[in-house]
Image: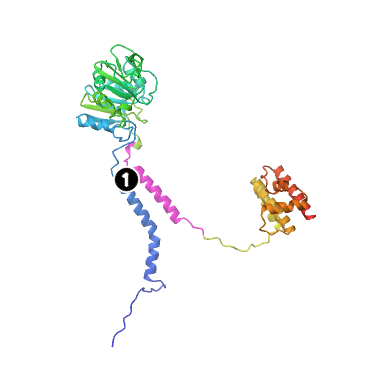
């Protein structure tokens, strides 16, 4: 005799629930905390990954975009030049000195004190997008004050070896020679160097100072054009060390030792962790917050008369200055009652209602249309006048 086999799918426990049901309940209760934990862990892993070594800063040596200068920096590095990219003048003072070159990109963020630090380094200076700082560092050079226009092809038209080696460049703007020993090259087409050029060079206190009126020759977009590469590499590669300095907004010191701020003392991961904690707080508030159920209808304990309801709604309209809503309610009531009086169905369109009311009241259809479907009033006086006109219209219809 065979023994019957009983297959138990879900064991029922004492409280009437099954093992599967209790497991599903636990999963529903724990899935949001687990999802939040997975999100925090994923964000922590992403924050621990190394940051990309590229930027979008104009003329930065790690910017691969059209306005970046990574191509020039990489070529100089392959030629044995030690390129140091800095954003603070204190780092320039530490890294630069006689026998090195400092490239200064723009001078609109520089102060007089920072310019003094650059002058005290004794290094060769190359100022791209040169302005007022060029005249301070070298009395023999000055900016023409004209903003660089669109880059154009310019010939050297001078005897400077670097300019002659380049031949032609694509650049704009102008620099002027204001003292002896200064050489200006690459004037605008049809002009001479006495009216300014895109490149100027002079010797001051045993060091070389070069000015570029335009950033275009250094950019990745224009480096390979004409003789831009030759001019840039010869100007920046004269020494084994090149300090690539782009002033920053928070670089306000004059090169002295600065006390680090509290934000600089914190590890870089602190802002990411703060955002994660904020996210945890928001999700927890949403998870544990009280949820309102669906609306439940119930009988009112008192009977509210229709007149009281109407007056209450009118007070709300008046308090909220909802002239349009009040006018729409008055017009809809007049149209509905007049249509019913004239035997029109409730689905009758506006043109049919207007014609019927106009014939019954002896008015022009355009007047009836303006009264029932015109623009809403904008003040109490207009709303009151509209109510009177609608009352007169409805009384005319009821007299028929």
Which residue is located at x 55 percent, y 60 percent?
A: 295
Which residue is located at x 35 percent, y 52 percent?
A: 39
Where is residue 329 shown, x and y percent of the image?
A: 67, 52
Magenta segment boundaries in residue numbering: 264-292
Is residue 233 visible to us here?
yes
Left or right: 363 with respect to 233? right
Q: Nearer the viewer, residue 306 or 126?
A: 126
Circle 1: element type:
helix
Would you identify the image quadrant in which residue 55 lies?
top left
Give the quarter of the figure containing the C terminus: bottom right
Does the stretch in magenta take in 266? yes
The correct choice, above or below, for 100 with respect to 383 in the image is: above
Where is residue 371 shown, x and y percent of the image?
A: 71, 47
Q: Which residue is mark 1?
A: 47
The correct choice, above or below, for 366 with respect to 233 in the image is: below
Q: Nearer the viewer, residue 158 or 189?
A: 189
């Amino acid at each position: 005799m065979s023994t019957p086999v009983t297959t138990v799918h879900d064991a029922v426990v004492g409280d009437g629930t099954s093992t599967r049901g209790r497991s599903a309940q636990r999963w529903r209760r724990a899935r949001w905390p687990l999802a939040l934990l997975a999100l925090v862990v994923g964000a922590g892993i992403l924050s621990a990954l190394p940051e990309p070594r590229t930027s979008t800063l104009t003329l930065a040596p790690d910017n691969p975009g059209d306005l970046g200068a990574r191509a020039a920096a990489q070529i100089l590095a392959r030629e044995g030049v030690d390129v140091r990219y800095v954003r603070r003048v204190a780092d320039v003072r530490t890294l630069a000195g006689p026998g090195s070159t400092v490239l200064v990109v723009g001078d609109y963020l520089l102060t007089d004190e920072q310019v003094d630090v650059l002058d005290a380094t004794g290094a060769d200076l190359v100022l791209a997008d040169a302005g007022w700082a060029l005249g301070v560092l070298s009395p023999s050079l000055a900016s023409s004050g004209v903003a660089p226009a669109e880059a154009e092809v310019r010939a050297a038209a001078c005897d400077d070896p670097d300019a002659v080696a380049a031949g032609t460049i694509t650049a704009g703007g102008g620099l002027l020679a204001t003292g002896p020993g200064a050489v200006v090259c690459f004037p605008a087409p049809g002009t001479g160097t006495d009216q300014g050029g895109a490149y100027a060079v002079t010797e001051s206190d045993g060091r070389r100072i070069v000015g570029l009126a335009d950033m275009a020759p250094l950019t990745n977009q224009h480096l390979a054009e004409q003789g831009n590469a030759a001019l840039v590499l010869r100007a920046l590669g004269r020494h084994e060390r090149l300090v690539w300095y782009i002033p920053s907004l928070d670089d306000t010191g004059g090169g002295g030792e600065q006390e680090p701020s509290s934000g600089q003392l914190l590890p870089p991961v602190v802002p990411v962790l703060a955002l994660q904690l904020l996210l945890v707080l928001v999700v927890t508030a949403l998870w544990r917050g009280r949820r309102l159920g669906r609306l439940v209808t119930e009988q009112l304990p008192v009977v509210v008369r229709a007149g009281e309801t109407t007056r209450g709604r009118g007070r709300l309209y008046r308090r909220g200055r909802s002239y349009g809503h009040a006018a729409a309610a008055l017009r809809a009531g007049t149209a509905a009652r007049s249509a019913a009086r004239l035997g029109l169905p409730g689905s009758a369109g506006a043109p049919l209602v207007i014609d019927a009311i106009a014939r019954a009241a002896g008015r022009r259809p355009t007047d009836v249309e303006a009264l029932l479907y015109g623009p809403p009033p904008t003040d109490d006086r207009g709303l009151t006048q509209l109510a009177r006109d609608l009352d007169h219209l409805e009384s005319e219809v009821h007299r028929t």
